[in-house]
Amino acid sequence: MKIVEIKRDKKHTVKVSFDDGRAYNFDIDYWNNICIRENDEIDDVTLNHHLKESDYIRAKARGIWFLDRSDYSEKTLYQKIVAGGISGTAAARAVARLKELGLVDDEKLARRLAEQMSDANISKRESYAKLYNKGIPSAIIKSVLEDTNFDELSQVLAVIEKKYRNKMSEKQDIQKVYAALIRKGFSYASVRDAIKKYTQEIEFYEED
């Protein structure tokens, strides 16, 4: 078939139209590099090869664009690329290449986020859920959380001091705080010990 028109479509793509009525978008840099012009003939095998390579180039460029703005897991980055209309095959190939280059690293990302969540007094259970929602595989999350220091009692005491110190004057208020801390993913034992310690310290302070 013959190419009848090559037209700039968007900032990074060209629209290539053929004499059989078909038209495809190609990455502009890729298209310029293969040096194919209007009125050139091209067969389906060659066309499909160029479509796959162009899609891969676009997928990789989008992946880098996303990573320049934030960190993503392999799964989430793949989903972001595909959401832009790029094929799953090209997206998977691009993510694999970015992983080879060290630009995508699920374990490194999980360790950094786990440390941040530990420091922010987020429970290990809630941290697991947050990491899982970012597309990090369960096996990596479990391994990382086992290596991360979550001093749960200290975390619960810190959360009480920050959010609930003025909400524990009555028994029913303490029960509400207890339930809220459990919902945050802290263990029953840690919540019980923290509230006991905190209320005793308040009582001791008031007696003084």
Image: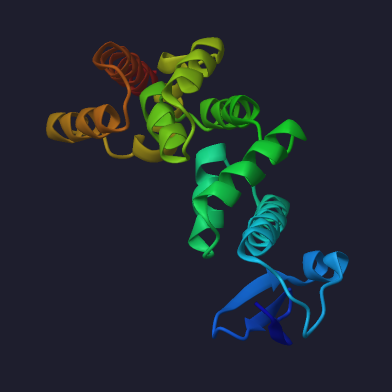
Residue at 34 percent across and 37 percent down: it is 164
**Which quarter of the rendering shows the C terminus?**
top left
Instruction: Count numbered badges in the picture.
Output: 0
- Is there any visible trace of residue 8 in the rendered image? no
Q: Residue at x 77, y 72 (%)?
A: 28
Compare residues 11 and 199 and report the one nearer the observer. 11
Relative to residue 4, is residue 14 depicted above or below?
A: above
Relative image position of residue 81 (x, y in whole percent)? 56, 55
Query: In this view of the protein, can residue 139 be seen by the observer?
Result: yes
Quadrant of the rendering where the N terminus is positioned: bottom right
Question: Percent x, y for residue 162?
Answer: 44, 37
Q: Relative to 123, is 26 on the left or the right?
A: right
Q: Quadrant of residue 156?
A: top left
Residue 74 locus on image (x, y percent): 56, 38
Q: Decide: is 203 above or below 47.
A: above
Q: Is residue 147 above or below residue 128?
A: above
Please name the residue shown 71% across and 39% down the image.
97
Q: Is residue 30 left or right of residue 139?
A: right
Of 3 and 149, nearer the camera is 3
Q: Position of residue 183 (x, y in %)?
A: 25, 32
Quarter assignment of residue 72: top right
| Residue at horizontal 57 percent and vertical 43 percent from the top | 92
